[in-house]
Amino acid sequence: MAQKPSIPKGTRDFSPVEMTRRNYMFDTIKSVFRTYGYAPLETPAMENLSTLMGKYGEEGDKLLFKILNSGNFMEKVTPEQIEGNPNALATKLCEKGLRYDLTVPFARFVVQHQNEIAFPFKRYQVQPVWRADRPQKGRYREFYQCDVDAIGSRSLLYEAELVEIVEEVFRRLGIAVVLKINNRKILFGIAEAIGHADKMIDITVAIDKLDKIGMENVEAELAERGIEPEAVAKLRPILTLEGTTAEKLAQLRQILAGSETGLKGVDEVEELFGHIATYGSTLDIELDLSLARGLNYYTGAIFEVKAKDFQIGSICGGGRYDDLTGIFGLPNTSGVGISFGADRIYDVMLGLGLFPEEAQMTTKVLLINFGGEEQKASMQLLKQLRQAGIQSDIYPEAAKMKKQMEYANKRAIPYVVIVGESERLEGVATVKNMAAGEQQKVAFADLAKVLA
């Protein structure tokens, strides 16, 4: 018996209906990116393993999909190496790996092509990435990222522009969102203010979970990480600051008075909110001091977007990084970017019924085939419809009418056009609306106009 066909765990097929919806979502997002002057970029699915290793921490290195060298991949391997360190063996057997995100390949591209690029360089990239993670609900081994970045300038106008992009993308998709903003310099200032500049990472990892696990559990985790009760007590009022953004910033200035870095963060947030006000944004934006995001490479503003009417994790996030390209030998090149979570945005839109009708159908019109002269007349009409940009099809043979109608229903085609002998002689077509069950007669010459 033949083996049942299947696909690797953590990957998915997308049916024509799903692809039509996904394309609608991607086209909307890309069109906003282009409106703001970002240019498209694509990088290969595989990179040299040396480009990827060591960029995502120890955990990330384990999640890289490595590709066996072609030909006899065991050729240069000695028996001692087989017994030894598995990581060292992997680098002998595999020179390449599938990309883990779009950020490291972007940094590699910028450094490799620095002499051809005009800085600041603004690019967007929508491509799949691969992670050898344990598949579970909402976590896949192959998934798409939609990244938009501006690199080569420290200007906060770019942060403000990303806020505008977030507002426009979700306005067009119809999703009500809240955008949370913080600054890594403020987080460092907070760590300094409670006397633990050395434990900045421990503190941010813990407070980033405030939403999920609540204040008491965060405080317990901080204690576990060696932060004494007095320092934890100082932290609580900072994380629960109330009031408008201006009031929060004024209170922060007093709390962080002794931290030069912290005050610089407050200045940056103030400037950013000023730019946002100049643009006249109507987005729901809040300064959230518990927002920590990504542990190491963000150095300034950080962003996270949550959907208001649908229970799901963040659907978009990013921030400012000052030295992403330094790992490839181009230091001091600051950039800022955000990533839209395609799969989560899709789930939100599906859950809230936000895909428009036309973003879910692959064919709008089916012409019934009666064979003979009627088939010829239908083929001529089909050409007219297609030239008018209407997605249309003809049944390939003169099968029973019932079979052709059932086919239209199975494919959820909303309109069926019937040209029988009497219609052909009169020069009219019968157009049936499949959902309403109503039909009307339309002159051949007007068919495209009526169906458009």
Image (spheres, rainbow, N blue to C red):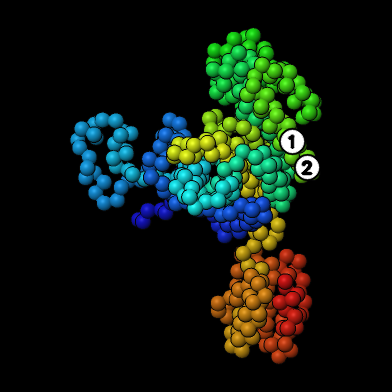
Look at the image and tell me in which quarter the N terminus lies. bottom left
Badge 1 crowding class, 10 Å Cα cut-off, few under 14, some 14 to 19, many 20 or more, is many
83 on left or right of 299: left
Q: Residue furthest left?
A: 79
Secondary element at tag 2: helix
Q: State the residue at coordinates (56%, 38%).
A: 334
Look at the image and tell me in which quarter the C terminus lies. bottom right
Q: State the residue at coordinates (56%, 54%).
A: 40
Corner quadrant of residue 290: top right
Question: As shown in the figure, which amino acid type bears the numbered disc 1?
Answer: Phe
Secondary element at tag 1: helix
Image coordinates for residue 165, horizontal then vertical, percent = 68, 47
Q: Which residue is mark 1?
A: 273
Q: Which residue is mark 2?
A: 278
Picture disc at residue 176: none
Q: Earlier in the sequence, mark 1 or mark 2?
A: 1
Question: As shown in the figure, which amino acid type bears the numbered disc 2?
Answer: Thr
Q: State the residue at coordinates (61%, 89%).
A: 373
Image coordinates for residue 69, horizontal then vertical, percent = 30, 47
